[in-house]
Image (tube, rainbow, N blue to C red):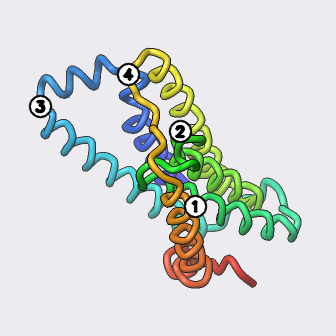
Amino acid sequence: MTLLIIGLVLFIATHLLRPVAPGLRNAGIAALGKPGWMALHGIVSLASLALIVYGFIDARENGGEMLYFPPAFMAHITLTLMAIAAICLVAGFLPPGHIRTKLKFPILVAIKIWALAHLLANGESYSVLLFVTILAWAVILRITLKKRIAAGETKLPVFVSAKYDVIAVVVGLALYAVIVLKLHEWLIGVAPLP
C-alpha cells in the first residue's frame, strides 16, 4: 500500500496548498509565473492520481486486510447514493439551477457522497484508506471554502434557471447508468451489479 499512501499524500498536499499554505502557493506563482505554477500543479496532480490508481490496483491484487464486512444490503444503499452523486457532479458543471445554488459546491458534495457510499460497501484496508482520505480532504476543503466565502474571496453561485436542474438530473442519471452498467467494471474491474 506504499504507493497508494504516497499518492494520497501527494494529492492532499497539492490540493490543500491554497487554503492551508497560501504563502507557499503565492511564492511559487511569483517564482514560476501563473502559467508555470499551473503547469507544475497539473503535472504533480496527474502524478498523484497515477500513483493512487496504480497503488490501489497493486494493493487489491496483493490482498488487503478486511477491517469490516459490510452487510449485503449496503450495496443497494451505495448504488442509490451514487445516483445522487452523479446528479450533483453534473450540476457542478452547469450554470446554477436550484441544485447548484442550494449545494453551493455540488462537485464537493458528489465527492463526499462517492467516498461515503464506497465506505459503506467496502471494508478492505486499502479501500478504507482511499475513501476516508478523500472524504476527509473534501470536508476540509469545504470548511476552507466556507471561510473564503465569509472573507469575500469566493462568490456563491447565483440562480439562473431551473432547466439546469432538469439537465443535471437527466445527464446525471445517464452518466450513472453508463458507470453502473459498464464503465465501473471496465475501469475498476468490479461490477457494481451482481
| Amino acid at the residue labelled 3 | Leu
Horizontally, residue 77 falls left or right of residue 134, namely right
Q: Is residue 138 visible?
A: yes
Q: CA distance from mark 3 to mark 4?
A: 23 Å
101 lies above or below 164: above
User: Which residue is pictured at 36% across the width and 28% down the height?
Assistant: 18
Q: Which residue is mark 3?
A: 32
Disc 2, SS: loop
| Amino acid at the residue labelled 2 | Lys
User: Which residue is pictured at 42% across the width and 25% down the height?
Assistant: 19
Disc 1, SS: helix
Q: Which residue is mark 4?
A: 153
Q: Residues within 10 Å of mark 4 (few under 14, many from 20)?
A: few
Q: Which residue is mark 1?
A: 87
| Amino acid at the residue labelled 1 | Ile
Q: CA distance from mark 2 to mark 1?
A: 14 Å
- Who comes first in sequence, dot 3 or dot 4? 3
Disc 4, SS: loop
